[in-house]
Image: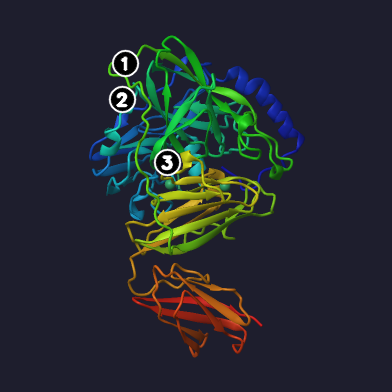
Amino acid sequence: MFTAFHLPKLCPTNIIAIALWVVSGFFNTAGAQFTTPAPVPPTLSGNTINLTLQNGTQQFYPGYNTATIGYNGNHLGPTLVLQKGQEVTINVTNTLGDTTTTHWHGLHVAPVNDGGPHSHIMDGETWSPAFTVMDNAATYWYHPHLHGKTLKQVVKGAAGLIIVQDNTENAIALPRTYGSDDFPLVFQFLTFNNATKQIEMTDDADNAVLVNGVIQPYLDVPAQVVRLRLLNASSHRFFEFSFSDNRTFYQITSDCGLLNAPVSMNRLMLASGERAEILVSFAGQSGSTLYLKQLGTQLPAGYPGGPAGMGMGGMALGPLDNTDFNLLKMNVTGPTANAITNIPAELVQNTVWSSAGTFIRNITITASPMMSTTNFFLNGVKFDEEVINFTAIQGNTEIWNITNQSMMPHPFHIHGNHFYVLSVNGATPPANQQGRKDVITIPPMMGSVQLIIRYEDFADPDMPYMYHCHILSHEDNGMMGQFLVLPPATGTLPQNPANQNPAATLYPNPAAETLTLQLNPALLTFGKIEIFNTSGQPVLQQNITQTFTVLNIASLPSGLYFVKITGAGITSTLKAVVEK
Ligand code: C2O
Ligand code: CU
Ligand code: CU
């Protein structure tokens, strides 16, 4: 089981253990050394899909039976192929002997169908979400999401891909013959116990990488343009993908859809939870071999998998950190009939939502103690299943400013609703991050990301969506929050314990002389504000005629006050503390 606080990182036993890994672990016994084919997971499609979560065993190392979890098999799961606009019912049966959930990562579904930590599937039970596929063509995935056990179940193999197809994508000349010129590739850094080869429920010293469940496999690819659907399903580490001949390739999707145009690159970083589809041309190269590689030395310092960073203090690197090594051998075979040989010039037109008048939400990541690499907070708090961290309104667009005051990067993920990245550290994001996304890395040490998100559908006053760090040990340790999407402008907003809700923000808190009320004009038109003391007596009333209203509270004694805001169609109550 994962423990919240790791051992001090510089103790001599760690150094010895790492030396042993390097000598006897990865380099000598790591499976088949590119002689086993990378399995292509089977597909499931149609209106009814049945998935069974089961315990199994798998031989990752010859002669060792490793305990695993899979969907419909011993390890990993089938690829679900869904068409935009179709109806689907997915029956997920749990035979694990333990509670679980199954989350459709990246799909725009109602909170009740999302499979987050509230949607428990007890052992022996079946959970059957039914929904319309509303997403654009891209590669999504599914995995368990039980709070505190996500890492444990995902590292043992409970993960599978979802391919969504649509008419727009179908009309573009792209490789799309699954297993022939279109390959799913699931990458997972894992920690195998050096003696027993069992998967350890930790992530700080990963010592192997599985590609579609195999250590060092090979893949035969035809001599033409090939599509690779890359998923980083690791609990923790980043990939910096490249090819052994440093060839150029083209990213065509971000997490949740096609980019405007293929983005040419020779290195691609993917954080835990992120996906990218890339096009690589092997045209005319029949008979050659090359490798897909991890360039750990090229990751930014302090990124898991890369060189040591400032905040890591004495934390030892894992045996595969800050090194470059081959992940997958690729043998180029003859071309198929009707081979795609060109990289398209354009793909789709992504239109970023207007940010005019949107509500600004601020999220700050902190660590405790400040140098901790395991214990993180979002806006000062940890996940509590009973606490809704904020509410949003269906139909609204919001800007989230996420600031990282910790020493580590965090891949930040939002459930159910896609976003566009407006800036990273104040600058326009690179072209490959300008499409629809659901995971974005917040750089360390006061790094910041501004994103714009729209809650198009699925108001539900009871069931929340999650937002969290996709480093699974951080998530399991409470680096997660939840929000409700409420119906547009109906009645009373729930009272928020903080001095902020989607309609208005009050500051400073506590206040002494003046209190400023900032309205979200998209939500609340002008009306009136009333302040009540704790015995319910009105102590101040004022009309609201502009977005910012400054209230003179010099005469109010110290204490707690309730601030009631009434606008067109909405009443909202906030708390304010006056302190002299
Ligand atoms: Cu892939 Cu909330 O997770
Ligand atoms: Cu998700
Ligand atoms: Cu994190």
Q: Residues within 10 Å of mark 1 (few under 14, many from 20)?
A: few
Give the label on residue 367, or none: none
Compare marks 3 and 2 and give the one earlier in the sequence.
2
Q: Is 385 situated above or below 494?
A: above
Q: Quadrant of residue 564?
A: bottom left
SS of the residue under disc 2 = loop
SS of the residue under disc 3 = loop
**What residue do we see at 73% from left, 43% from top?**
313
In the image, the residue with mark 1 has its CB under 8 Å from the nearest atom of ligand 1: no
Q: Which residue is mark 2?
A: 177
Real-space CA distance between mark 1 and mark 2, rounded to the nearest whole angstrom: 10 Å
Q: Which residue is mark 1?
A: 336
> Percent position (x, y) of residue 220?
41, 16
Q: Residues within 10 Å of mark 2 (few under 14, many from 20)?
A: few
> Do the numbered discs 1 and 2 sit on residues whose CB atoms are within 8 Å?
yes
Q: Which residue is mark 3?
A: 255
Q: Quadrant of residue 40?
A: top left
